[in-house]
């Protein structure tokens, strides 16, 4: 209790027998603990969430997308090419650290700590909306997902859209309970502003059910707050579209072409990608259906429906509707899969799922089944995050070795790297870069980006995993074996006389 509460208790216990006053204080303390217990539980979940990241994923190197985002603001690193589908939210997120140091470890630690805080703040409004342990359990279910643990400290937008979605929907539902909650409306603006700065299209799909409900029920304040938040991200996106991409329509067309948008049905790809790879595209073998992962995926709609049906709370219906809106947009409008795409949906659906679990725990027989099922879920996720963390760590640990070999060859800034993993390697080497997956271009001439770098007299290198020239223009260049330990053979082609 704070000082005001203590003085109030003292005033109210004047003239009361000592034993009765002590009992009254004990009752007040128990009541205070009952109110704060969910907050403490949620805080413990957030602390454990951060601790696991620091133990398992903080040493993992940067991926391609991360290198693009961070290079826009990282100290001493040339900005990589920023394509039409990307938004600027991630670079704003990492700027406080990246402007000081480009250290990958420093950025990972910063994002781990920030993720723990974000998880706590996102689910905190739901404590007021749901009695009992629904919010802490939902945070644990979402935070324990291997994808959440893997992406929590990655400089990628999806987790931050997820946190913003949970907070925004919760605050919107809270305004219905407390119509004059000005702070809640301000929080809605902030939550959807963050989401739209990260991924404007995702934020819009998440907001559609809220906007529809607000219009139908004439709840103008939360609807206007949601719209204001969306407008912040879309305004930035459209301004950049005009300045850099030839206008909003041209940018939408370029983004759609790069992301294979249109009418699709990609649920089978999402199921195959539940256990990796991180991107089910570009000729990557996605594998078969991982049965243990498909099992929990299939259980989500069942438990979510049970939670909504038994609790009969509008807030859970809103979480279900907003989560499904985002999930269906990816399943039916994007022609490939990446497990991270559905993270905001998982974050929201964890709320009705936890309510469904709570319902089963009311009876002894079903409680045992619920506890065993949740325990199996966490075991599967723990195994997955460990395996994938080790695999990705090994894959990305090659980049620093390549940088060291290139520096021994005489590479120094200003420099330009082109080819396979060139963006990640260029970030570490503080070189300008252009990454490619398979097509190295240059069928009739040297690619324009390489010609421009040579015109600037930069040190130029084309990185490949094959000694054979991947493009005709490289036939006259010198191939150097980088002699990196591991499965792949890495080579760099340098221009004649380079």
Image: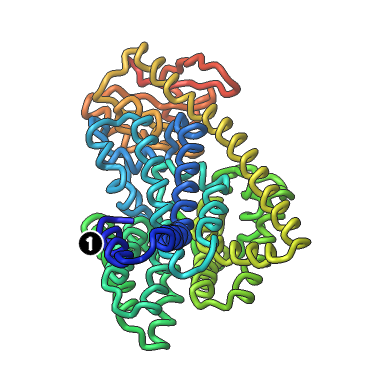
In the rendered image, residue 456, in percent from the top left (x then y), is placed at 21, 28
What residue is drawn where x is 67% and y is 44%?
380
In the rendered image, residue 378, in percent from the top left (x then y), is placed at 64, 46
**Figure check: 481 above or below 364:** above
Q: Quadrant of residue 384?
A: top right
| Colour mapping | rainbow
Q: As drawn, is 336 to the left or to the right of 450?
A: right
What residue is drawn where x is 42% and y is 76%?
210
**Figure check: 407 above or below 189:** above
Look at the image and tell me whether residue 28 can be seen.
yes
In the rendered image, residue 345, in percent from the top left (x then y), is placed at 52, 61
Q: Nearer the viewer, residue 426 or 30?
A: 30
Q: Nearer the viewer, residue 90 or 152?
A: 152
Crowd tier of the residue under label 1, counting other residues whose Cα lies within 10 Å: few below 14, some 14–19, many 20 or above: few
What residue is drawn where x is 36% and y is 66%?
16
Q: As drawn, is 442 to the left or to the right of 130?
A: left
- How many numbered discs, if any? 1
The residue indicated by pointer 1 is 239
Q: Quadrant of residue 78?
A: top left
Give the SS element for disc 1.
Answer: helix
- Indicate the quadrant containing the N terminus: top left, top right, bottom left or bottom right: bottom left
- Indicate the quadrant containing the C terminus: top left, top right, bottom left or bottom right: top left
In the rendered image, residue 56, in percent from the top left (x then y), is placed at 52, 33
Q: Quadrant of residue 336?
A: bottom right
**Figure check: 465 above or below 230:** above
What residue is drawn where x is 59% and y is 44%?
283
Look at the image and tell me whether residue 260 can be seen.
no
Q: Nearer the viewer, residue 227 or 485?
A: 227
Q: Residue furthest top?
A: 408
């Amino acid at each position: 209790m704070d000082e005001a509460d203590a003085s109030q208790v003292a005033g109210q216990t004047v003239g009361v027998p000592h034993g009765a006053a002590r009992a009254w204080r004990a009752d007040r303390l128990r009541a205070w603990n009952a109110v704060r217990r969910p907050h403490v539980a949620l805080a413990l979940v957030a602390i454990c969430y951060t601790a696991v990241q620091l133990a398992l994923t903080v040493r993992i190197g940067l991926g391609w997308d991360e290198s693009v985002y961070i290079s826009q603001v990282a100290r001493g690193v040339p900005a990589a090419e920023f394509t039409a589908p990307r938004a600027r939210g991630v670079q704003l997120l990492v700027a406080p650290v990246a402007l000081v140091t480009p250290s990958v470890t420093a950025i990972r630690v910063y994002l781990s700590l920030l993720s723990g805080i974000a998880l706590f703040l996102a689910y905190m409004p739901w404590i007021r909306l749901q009695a009992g342990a629904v919010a802490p359990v939902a945070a644990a279910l979402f935070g324990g997902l291997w994808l959440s643990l893997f992406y929590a400290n990655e400089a990628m937008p999806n987790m931050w859209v997820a946190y913003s979605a949970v907070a925004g929907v919760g605050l919107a539902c809270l305004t219905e309970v407390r119509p004059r909650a000005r702070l809640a409306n301000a929080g809605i603006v902030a939550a959807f502003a963050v989401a739209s700065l990260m991924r404007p299209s995702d934020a819009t799909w998440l907001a559609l059910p809220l906007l529809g409900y607000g219009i139908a029920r004439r709840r103008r304040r939360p609807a206007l707050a949601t719209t204001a938040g969306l407008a912040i991200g879309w305004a930035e996106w459209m301004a950049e579209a005009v300045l850099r991409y030839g206008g909003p329509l041209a940018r939408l067309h370029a983004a759609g072409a790069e992301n294979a948008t249109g009418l699709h049905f990609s649920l089978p790809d999402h199921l195959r990608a539940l256990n990796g790879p991180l991107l089910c595209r570009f000729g990557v073998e996605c594998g078969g259906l991982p049965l243990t992962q498909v099992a929990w995926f299939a259980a989500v709609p069942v438990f979510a429906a049970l939670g909504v049906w038994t609790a009969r709370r509008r807030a859970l219906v809103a979480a279900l509707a907003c989560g499904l809106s985002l999930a269906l947009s990816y399943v039916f409008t994007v022609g490939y899969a990446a497990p991270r795409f559905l993270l905001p949906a998982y974050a929201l659906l964890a709320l009705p799922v936890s309510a469904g679990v709570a319902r089963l725990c009311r009876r002894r027989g079903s409680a045992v089944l619920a506890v065993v099922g949740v325990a199996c879920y966490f075991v599967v996720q723990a195994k997955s995050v460990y395996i994938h963390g080790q695999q990705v760590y090994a894959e990305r640990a090659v980049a620093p070795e390549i940088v060291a070999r290139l520096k021994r060859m005489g590479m120094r800034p200003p420099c330009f790297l082109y080819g396979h993993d060139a963006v990640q390697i260029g970030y570490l080497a503080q070189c300008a870069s252009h990454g490619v997956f398979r097509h190295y271009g240059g069928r009739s001439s040297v690619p324009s980006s390489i010609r421009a770098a040579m015109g600037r007299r930069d040190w130029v290198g084309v990185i490949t995993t094959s000694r054979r020239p991947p493009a005709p223009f490289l036939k006259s260049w010198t191939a150097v074996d980088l002699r990196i330990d591991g499965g792949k053979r890495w080579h760099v082609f340098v221009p004649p006389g380079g």
